[in-house]
Amino acid sequence: VTLGVLASGSGSNLEAIAVAITNGDLLAQIAVVIYNEPNAFVRQRAEKFGIPAILINHRDYKSRQDLDRKIIEVLQQYQVELVIMAGWMRIVTQVLIDAFPDRILNIHPSLLPSFKGNHAIEQAYNYGVKITGCTVHLLSVEVDSGKILKQAAVPVLDSDRLEDLQTRIQVQEHIIYPQAIAEYMRTISK
Ligand code: GRF
């Protein structure tokens, strides 16, 4: 299966997926990484793995739909079959979803449906929950609401600073995202 990864930031999930592929745990290839922030570290990670990284700066597009149309063009150019959102910080429209129905996965740093949105870890931390986690789900137009594919629970310790919790959640993300992709690929190839 040919993957295309969309990322806005550090790209640690991209790296975890690329490592799973290198190790033979995930039978796929990453054809392209699309990123929207010119200075995003994900570009360097993609280069390290020899994956083409294409900048699509959302500031150059007048609507979310236009941005999505450009993304589709690049994904199709690289013959992407499954789209992997790994810290993509733009709201996606129906245009992208219609081009890849049930073929876009996302990872979110909470146990959905709790703590949707951009500040999930901080909100869980401030709320004082004792267990949070991360969720891999199918993308739907309503943010952080598509079908859940896999979750991992992560304890919040009394001694945790926000960064400690963030690190513990990311460790689990890097484990479950490659697994969820492998499992989902099996269900769609049947
Ligand atoms: C992850 O915590 C993910 O849950 C969230 O954005 C972060 C991306 O991190 N959606 P990275 O760029 O993969 O390091």
Image (cartoon, rainbow, N blue to C red):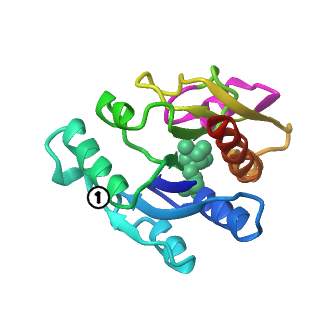
Mark 1 crowd level (few <14, some 14–19, many ≥20, 10 Å Cα): some
Which of the two residues, 25 or 162, is positioned nearer the viewer here? 25
In the image, what residue occupies the spot 42% across and 44% down? Answer: 89
Which of the two residues, 111 or 129, is positioned nearer the viewer here? 111
Work out which quarter of the rendered image holds the C terminus and state it: top right
Which of the two residues, 166 or 76, is positioned nearer the viewer here? 76
Asked if the stretch drawn in magenta spans residue 126, the answer is yes
**Horizontal and vertical percent position of residue 129:** 76, 25
Residue 89 position (above or below residue 77): above
Q: Quadrant of residue 97?
A: top left
Please indicate whether residue 112 sits to the left or right of residue 160 in the image: left
Q: Which residues are magenta?
A: 116-132
Residue 166 position (above or below residue 129): below
Which type of secondary structure does the marked residue at label 1 adopt? Answer: loop
Residue most extreme to the left: 62
Kind of residue at badge 1: Ile
Asked if the stretch drawn in magenta spans residue 101, the answer is no
Please indicate whether residue 80 sits to the left or right of residue 96 in the image: right
Please indicate whether residue 70 sits to the left or right of residue 151 in the image: left
Report the residue marked by disc 1.
56
In the image, what residue occupies the spot 44% across and 63% down? Answer: 32
Q: Quadrant of residue 159?
A: top right
**Horizontal and vertical percent position of residue 138:** 55, 31
**Horizontal and vertical percent position of residue 72:** 31, 47
**Horizontal and vertical percent position of residue 183:** 73, 41
Residue 93 position (above or below residue 165): above
Work out which quarter of the rendered image holds the N terminus and state it: bottom right
In the image, what residue occupies the spot 66% across and 32% down? Answer: 110
Please indicate whether residue 3 sits to the left or right of residue 113 in the image: left
